[in-house]
């Protein structure tokens, strides 16, 4: 969501990054005055609308920021790609929290090691291979061919996050998906994205987010 707003040069306020921002978000979620409350962050407040779920937010923002073509077929295709990325992201999370999100990683480490081994051996190549094939079938350098979309931004984020979380696995796999890696590099070079990545607005990958690096989950 941040990447889309930054790439479009949109004026926005990231409430969570403000002092006391998380407490403000929690109070908002608990407020009985919100008729259609989101389940959890992230969510977007656009005028009177409250929109939750990243894929849903991007479905709303895409046409307004020029990050998706106008035709319904293209909008649905980009949304489908985004939902597939959302599925992939869940599997990244479950590689270090396979039992329960409410337990610490250390409380489920043996299970995480088994889950992560399957993820890097089977699931990660499958997802990378899928997006590589989409790029092959739509020549032009983006998931839509020649039209840039928010799905390209999301694929960039996945590759960047996985390079942090499982650098050894990615080093082994990147030669199999040159199109996806080239797309990542082109996104990183987009002027507004490059400025964002170099700024303090970009949240560094860490062990509190979805992409987490634990050496034992990324074997040689």
Image (cartoon, helix red, strand yellow):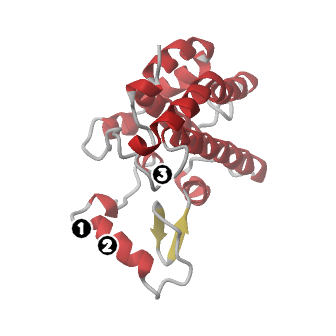
- Secondary structure, mark 3, is loop
Along the line of sight, the residue nearer the viewer: 172 or 192: 172
Q: Residue at x 56, y 79 (%)?
A: 36
Q: Residue at x 37, y 72 (%)?
A: 26
Quadrant housing residue 144: top right
Q: Residue at x 24, y 44 (%)?
A: 200
Say which mark, if any, is on residue 20. Answer: 1
- Residue 40: x and y, percent? 48, 65
Task: Kindly indicate whether the residue at mark 1 contacts the one at mark 3 (C-beta within 8 angstroms).
Answer: no
Task: Kindly indicate whether the residue at mark 2 contacts the one at mark 1 (C-beta within 8 angstroms).
Answer: yes
- Residue 210: x and y, percent? 45, 44
Say which mark, if any, is on residue 24. Answer: 2
One can see residue 214 in this view = yes
**How many residues crowd around disc 3 within 10 Å: few (fewer than 14), some, or many (20 or more)?**
some
Q: CA distance from mark 3 to mark 1?
A: 21 Å
Along the line of sight, the residue nearer the viewer: 28 or 14: 28
Residue most toward the left? 19
One can see residue 149 in this view = no
Quadrant housing residue 134: top right
Q: Residue at x 30, y 70 (%)?
A: 23
Along the line of sight, the residue nearer the viewer: 53 or 120: 120
In the rendered image of this protein, does residue 121 appear above or below residue 190?
above
- Secondary structure, mark 1, is loop
Q: Is residue 57 left or right of residue 69?
A: left
Say which mark, if any, is on residue 71. Answer: none
Q: Is residue 38 left or right of residue 88?
A: left
Looking at the rendered image, the disc whose residue lies closer to the viewer, 3 or 1, is: 1
Say which mark, if any, is on residue 1. Answer: 3
């Amino acid at each position: 969501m941040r990447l889309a707003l930054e790439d479009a040069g949109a004026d926005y306020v990231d409430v969570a990054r403000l002092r006391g921002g998380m407490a403000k978000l929690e109070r908002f979620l608990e407020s009985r005055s919100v008729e259609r409350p989101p389940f959890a962050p992230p969510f977007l407040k656009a005028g009177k609308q409250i929109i939750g779920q990243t894929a849903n937010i991007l479905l709303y923002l895409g046409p307004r920021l020029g990050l998706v073509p106008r035709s319904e077929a293209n909008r649905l295709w980009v949304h489908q790609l985004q939902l597939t990325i959302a599925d992939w992201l869940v599997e990244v999370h479950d590689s270090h929290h396979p039992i329960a999100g409410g337990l610490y990683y250390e409380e489920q480490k043996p299970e995480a090691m088994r889950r992560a081994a399957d993820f890097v051996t089977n699931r990660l190549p499958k997802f990378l291979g899928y997006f590589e094939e989409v790029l092959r079938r739509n020549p032009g350098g983006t998931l839509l061919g020649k039209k840039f979309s928010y799905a390209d931004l999301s694929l960039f984020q996945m590759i960047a996050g996985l390079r942090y979380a499982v650098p050894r696995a990615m080093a082994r796999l990147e030669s199999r998906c040159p199109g996806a890696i080239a797309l990542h590099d082109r996104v990183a070079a987009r002027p507004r994205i490059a400025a964002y990545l170099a700024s303090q607005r970009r949240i560094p990958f860490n062990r509190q987010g979805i992409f987490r690096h634990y050496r034992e989950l990324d074997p040689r």
